[in-house]
Image: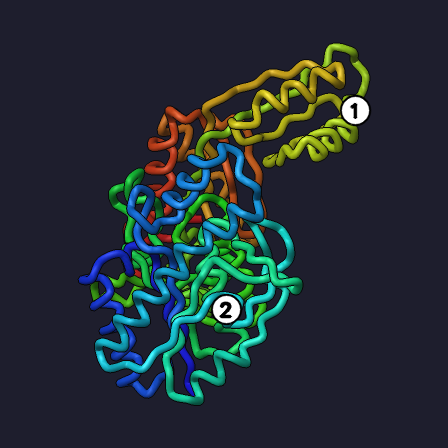
Amino acid sequence: MKVVIQKFGGTSVATDDARQRLVARVKHAMSDGLVPVVVVSAMGRGGEPYATDTLIDLAKEACPDPDPRELDLIMSCGETISTVVVSGTLRSAGIDSIAMTGAQAGLITDGTYGNSRIVRVDPARVIEQLEMRKTPVIAGFQGVTETGETTTLGRGGSDTTAVAIGAALGALNVEIFTDVDGIKTADPRVVPQARTIDRMSYDEISQMAHEGAKVIHPRAVEIAMRHNVPLRIRSTFDDSPGTLVSRTQGALAWPESRHYQVVTGITHVTDLCHVSLLNGTGEALPVTSVFRKLAEGGVSVDMISVSQDDCSFVIKDDVYDRTNRILKGLGLGADFKRRCAKVSVVGSGMRGVPGVMANVAEALHDAGVGILQTSDSHVTISCLVSHENLEKAARALHERFELAKTNGDRRDVS
């Protein structure tokens, strides 16, 4: 069987018109000789009757601090409702289908309520339905532990469900249908000139997801990369081909070309706080104790810079009070700069290429944006800036690396 996974997000199942477009997508796959498996998110967004945030609010009306196990039970209901509605819509259109929960589809998870991980997939019941020529409609975002407890996979977890099912079935690819036409070179709300990217590598989309792009869940990309499952992110509402994500980005096959792509996209994360430890003693800072106590306090740190005399790092702004208490408990003072944002340039093409950081620094300097701290990897350079400079920084970097242009129209920017 030539299986393809078709995952539809909340806006793609929220209305009858959207669901009719879903039906058309399924029928198109069938006409191409493919065997579709459908994965769905909860219907709509916060405030709509069956959206996940609406269900959370309902639970909190009864108890402001609901039990995590019970919260997962109610959160999983949105996707279950979607499976029944979508399966019924497919049957009304002449497609024999069956609604399945995550548990029925064989998604076995660990016991972490609210942010569970998939430990294995047993697709036997899905395969059984496919052999009966039925189209499974599987609830995303949910699974079951070995002991039968319902858990959810965290925000965006339906993407993870789709890719995990795809890997288990040996699917040709996974199509992620959403309300945008693919991955953009930047957030178009921040950079109006952002365009849709045709092709990306797993490394690039994984980094973009981790650094703030919200089109696909990072765990979904990790599973796709591990099992070499191609992804296509596209719109339910138009016929554009979207963005193909696979092992290599097509432009990198010929690095000798002067137009090969160094930077693929710009991402950003907001609501950050820069922390610089104050050292008035002249002695080395107790960095081991600092990071251990922060970890024990549930504080995640990023963009870490440590030397013999200095230590600075970045935290989410919502853990500022907790971090301050921990540092004071260690007898340490700190300078906190709140309302910061991290702006990152991402691209597999920058690996080993000199001059990328020079272009980043020059672009931000020319735009009048001060850099508070930097970090990097083989495919990412991140700069911490004040929140008020976020738009200027993202637009300056997008322009410097000519991301509004296609590869053939670019000069050699590195």
Q: Quadrant of residue 262?
A: bottom left
Question: Residue 247 got which mark?
Answer: 2
The residue sitting at 34% across, 67% down in the picture is 84
Mark 1 neighbour density, 10 Å: few (under 14) some (14–19) many (20 or more): few
Q: Position of residue 352 (x, y in %)?
A: 57, 53
Q: Please state which of residues 219 and 129 is positioned toward the viewer in this rendering.
A: 129
Q: Amino acid at mark 2?
A: Arg
The residue sitting at 42% across, 85% down in the picture is 2
Q: Quadrant of the N terminus?
A: bottom left
Q: Position of residue 103 (x, y in %)?
A: 53, 67
- Tag 1 secondary structure: loop
Q: Which residue is mark 1?
A: 286
Q: Position of residue 385 (x, y in %)?
A: 46, 28
Is 54 placed left or right of 284 in the picture?
Answer: left
* First reached walking from the N terminus: tag 1 or tag 2: 2
Residue 208 in sight from this viewpoint: no
Question: Residue 274 got which mark?
Answer: none
Residue 332 in sight from this viewpoint: yes
Is 127 placed left or right of 306 in the picture?
Answer: left
